[in-house]
């Protein structure tokens, strides 16, 4: 005999485009994630914060298929999935933009925009098409660059960040995972990203920025989500106090064991 799911809970889960349930991950003797439970609702921007070493990057890599969890499950649009690789996750509409951006400095903007998904007019690259579409995509995001023919190495940090994000947005990503995406980006470009993609998980250290652009905030501590509140329900002070308290507790534990 199985119990029926409460109507409100069923409706809530149907609206979740992504759910992470009891995810854990170890690297030898080091436990990165203990029991992570996280959800991303449809048309929501979720901010994931935590101190250095809290496991944020590990969770991001699991969600984009770069690493496999030791236990737990991922539910995407109501169906349990196992991301076999980054390409597999992308094929299901989940993509990530990391702090290092994964851009090739020596290539032009438009070649970076179509990296690993180049347009071909056999037997040559269709540079004209890639150049035209890159101009269109960046214009839609309000990104100003000298030319799509310029090498990426010659651009500012914010411009490079915008190119990496635009590449994911226009590769048909439905869920975007952003690791410190707004650090080098101006307010205008950041607003454009939020307008183009609403199913977002943003990893950031700037709590004020998180509360400004995110609908909800999760705090990752000791390998678990210890806080899950809407941005209106919390504050920079509360988030800072929680992280500082964790840091002080760790220091005290270190002194006791010394």
Image (spheres, grey):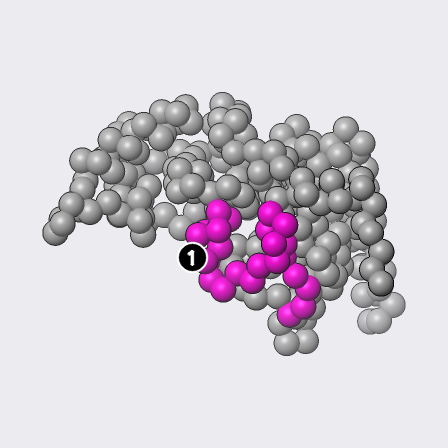
Q: Is residue 85 magenta?
A: yes
Q: State the residue lying farthest toward the right.
A: 256
Extent of the magenta region: 70-96
The foreground one among 201 and 186 is: 201
Q: Position of residue 162 (x, y in %)?
A: 43, 35
The foreground one among 219 and 84 is: 84
Q: State the residue lying farthest toward the left.
A: 123
- For label 1, the residue is 87
Camera sees residue 70 = yes
Quadrant location of the N terminus in the rendered image? bottom right
| Crowdedness near tag 1: few (<14), some (14–19) or many (≥20) residues, C-alpha within 10 Å | some
Residue under the image location 34 percent in, 36 percent down: 155
Residue under the image location 49 percent in, 35 percent down: 184
Residue under the image location 73 percent in, 64 percent down: 34
Q: Position of residue 105 (x, y in %)?
A: 31, 47
Q: Position of residue 110 (x, y in %)?
A: 27, 39
Camera sees residue 240 = no
The answer to whether 127 appears left or right of 28 in the picture is left
**Within the image, what quadrant is residue 63 found in?**
bottom right
- Is 87 above or below relative to 113? below
Under circle 1, the secondary element is helix
């Amino acid at each position: 005999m199985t119990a029926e799911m409460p109507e409100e809970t069923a409706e809530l889960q149907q609206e979740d485009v992504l759910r992470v349930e009891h995810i854990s991950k170890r690297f030898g003797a080091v436990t990165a994630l203990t029991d992570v439970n996280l959800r991303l609702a449809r048309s929501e921007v979720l901010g994931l914060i935590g101190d250095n070493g809290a496991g944020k990057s590990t969770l991001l890599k699991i969600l984009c298929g770069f690493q496999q969890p030791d236990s737990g499950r991922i539910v995407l649009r109501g169906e349990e999935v196992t991301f076999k690789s980054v390409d597999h996750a992308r094929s299901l509409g989940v993509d990530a933009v990391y702090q290092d951006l994964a851009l090739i400095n020596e290539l032009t903007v438009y070649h970076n925009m179509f990296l690993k998904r180049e347009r071909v007019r056999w037997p040559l690259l269709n540079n004209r098409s890639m150049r035209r579409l890159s101009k269109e995509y960046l214009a839609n995001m309000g990104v100003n660059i000298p030319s799509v023919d310029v090498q990426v190495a010659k651009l500012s940090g914010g411009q490079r960040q915008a190119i990496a994000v635009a590449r994911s947005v226009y590769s048909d990503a439905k869920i975007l995972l952003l690791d410190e995406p707004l650090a080098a980006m101006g307010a205008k470009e950041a607003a454009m990203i939020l307008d183009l993609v609403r199913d977002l998980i943003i990893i950031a250290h700037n709590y004020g920025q998180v509360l400004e652009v995110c609908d909800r905030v999760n705090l990752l501590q000791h390998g678990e989500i210890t806080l899950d509140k809407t941005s209106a329900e919390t504050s920079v002070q509360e988030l800072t106090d929680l992280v500082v308290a964790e840091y002080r507790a760790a220091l005290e534990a270190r002194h006791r064991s010394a």
